[in-house]
Image: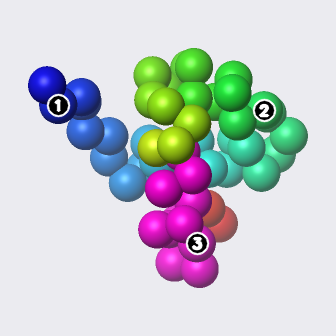
C-alpha cells in the first residue's frame, strides 16, 4: 500500500521546520511520514534551494 504523496512545497516546509529547531520526530508526526522518509527528502533536496 502506497502512502500519500506530498508536494515539493510541503516537503520544503517540513525541511524548513527542522532547520528552525523543530525536532525531526515532531515534523514527521505532523506530516504523517516516517523519519527515514524525512532523511530521504533531506538527502534528495539538499542543495536544490527548496528550503530557502
In the image as oriented, which residue stretches furthest toward the bottom?
47
Asked if the residues shown at circle 3 and circle 1 are in contact, with their CB atoms under 8 angstroms apart, the answer is no
What is the secondary structure assignment of the residue under circle 3? Answer: loop
What is the secondary structure assignment of the residue under circle 2? Answer: loop
Read off the magenta span.
38-50
Residue 24, image x and y in percent? 70, 36
Disc sitting over residue 23 in the figure: 2
Q: Earlier in the sequence, mark 3 or mark 1?
A: 1
Q: Within 10 Å of the Cα at label 3, are there few (<14), some (14-19), or many (20+) other Cα atoms?
A: few
Residue 48, image x and y in percent? 51, 78
Residue 14, image x and y in percent? 58, 42
Q: Main secondary structure of the magenta part?
A: helix
Q: Which residue is mark 1?
A: 2
Kindly identify the residue that appears in the image at 32 percent across and 46 percent down.
7
The residue nearer to you, when weighing 2 against 31, is 2
Q: Which residue is mark 3?
A: 46
Amino acid at each position: 500500500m502506497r502512502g500519500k504523496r506530498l508536494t515539493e512545497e510541503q516537503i520544503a516546509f517540513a525541511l524548513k521546520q527542522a532547520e528552525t529547531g523543530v525536532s525531526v520526530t515532531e515534523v514527521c508526526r505532523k506530516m504523517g511520514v516516517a523519519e527515514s522518509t524525512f532523511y530521504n527528502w533531506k538527502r534528495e533536496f539538499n542543495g536544490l534551494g527548496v528550503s530557502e
